Amino acid sequence: MLNSYLPLLLVVAFVVANAVMMVAVSKGADWLLKSYRPTAVKQSAYESGMPTLGEAGERFSVKYYLVTILFIVFDIEAVFMIPWAVGFAQLKEMTGLLLIEMLIFMLILAVGYIYVWKRGAFEWD
């Protein structure tokens, strides 16, 4: 019985040993080769070489969240088309019904897209 779990136990032991070794080597190399001299430039926040503007806890615009949610919704709806394509290829006797269902789905998606577009959700000020 133990022979069947031996490969799994070896993999787990290897992963744990590798994680411990990586942390130990990282901390050891940092301690051994440390040549850190703190300066004002080194302790300032790095933002792509540009000085920071404003506070770090600044609020995002609601438009940012709206665009994010819309992207997720449209992306998930696009993912629903993959199982439909598999079913369409396998169910030869129902191709007409499946095609009509996908056209209705695409029409609803297009109406939602046009509505969001007309409301100005994609315009970034």
Image (cartoon, helix red, strand yellow):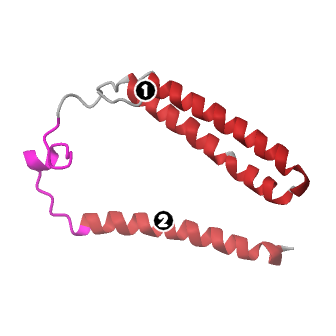
Q: Position of residue 28 (x, y in %)?
A: 32, 67
Q: Position of residue 93 (x, y in %)?
A: 91, 53
Provide the major secondary structure of the magenta segment.
loop
- Regarding mark 1 in the picture, which secondary structure is present there? loop
Q: Position of residue 35 (x, y in %)?
A: 15, 63
* Quadrant holding the N terminus: bottom right
The foreground one among 63 and 120 is 120
Observer-side mark, 1 or 2, equals 1
Residue at image x 35%, y 65%?
A: 26
The foreground one among 111 and 72 is 111
The foreground one among 48 and 67 is 67
Please name the amino acid that badge 2 sits on.
Answer: Val
Q: For residue 39: magenta?
A: yes
Residue at image x 34%, y 27%?
A: 60
Residue 101, numbered label: none
- Regarding mark 2 in the picture, which secondary structure is present there? helix
Mark 1: give few (<14), some (14-19) or many (20+) Cα within 10 Å.
some
Residue picked out by circle 2 = 20
Residue picked out by circle 1 = 121
Please name the amino acid that badge 1 sits on.
Answer: Ala
Relative to 56, residue 15 above or below: below
